[in-house]
Image (cartoon, grey):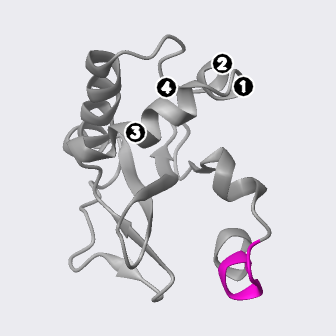
Amino acid sequence: MPAAFLSYPAPSLTDGVVLLRRWADSDIGCVEEASLDPDIPEGTTVPAQFTPAEGLAWIERQWGRADNGEGLSLAITDADSTEALGAIVLLFRPQPGTSSLAIGLSSALAAADSPPEQSRFWFA
């Protein structure tokens, strides 16, 4: 059992370039894109065979991480459009005082020649 429950940041976290927020049903396109990369479903709970129902189930699992004390999953979005571009997930581990952090970006964004102010965020 984790030592503490995490709650969604209010207001959402932003640096003006990207925004971190709770996942929404409307983010299903980001989940679909992630399912097209064979490496992502292999190491995550993103569905390997995408369907709208499986995509929504993935989003609901992300909400459940905070609800059950497992950790916190946030959508990485464009600050202006709030379009989901990836995920950042903090999970508690069974070992006392241990957690893990994972960051995943859409293939289009990860492959883009991002300006330095955007790259600063992704790899800081």
Q: Residues within 10 Å of mark 2 (few under 14, many from 20)?
A: few
User: Do the residues under discs 2 and 1 have CB atoms within 8 angstroms?
Assistant: yes
Residue 116 magenta-highlighted: yes
Segment tinted magenta in the rendering: 114-119
Indicate the amino acid at tag 1: Asp
Query: Could you tell me which residue is drawn at 48 percent across and 88 percent down?
Result: 15
**For this rendering, which residue is in front, 75 or 115?**
115
Query: Could you tell me which residue is drawn at 44 percent across and 17 percent down?
Result: 50
Indicate the amino acid at tag 3: Gly
Question: Marks 4/1: CA distance?
Answer: 10 Å
Q: Nearer the viewer, mark 3 or mark 1?
A: 3
User: Would you say 78 lies left or right of 56 here?
Assistant: right
Q: What residue is disc 2 on?
A: 42
The quarter of the rendered structure image containing the C terminus is: bottom right
Location of residue 41 in the rendering, given as x and y in whole percent from the top left corner: 59, 22
- Residue 29: numbered disc: 3
Question: Marks 2/4: CA distance?
Answer: 8 Å
User: Do the residues under discs 3 and 1 have CB atoms within 8 angstroms?
Assistant: no
Main secondary structure type of the part rendered in magenta: helix
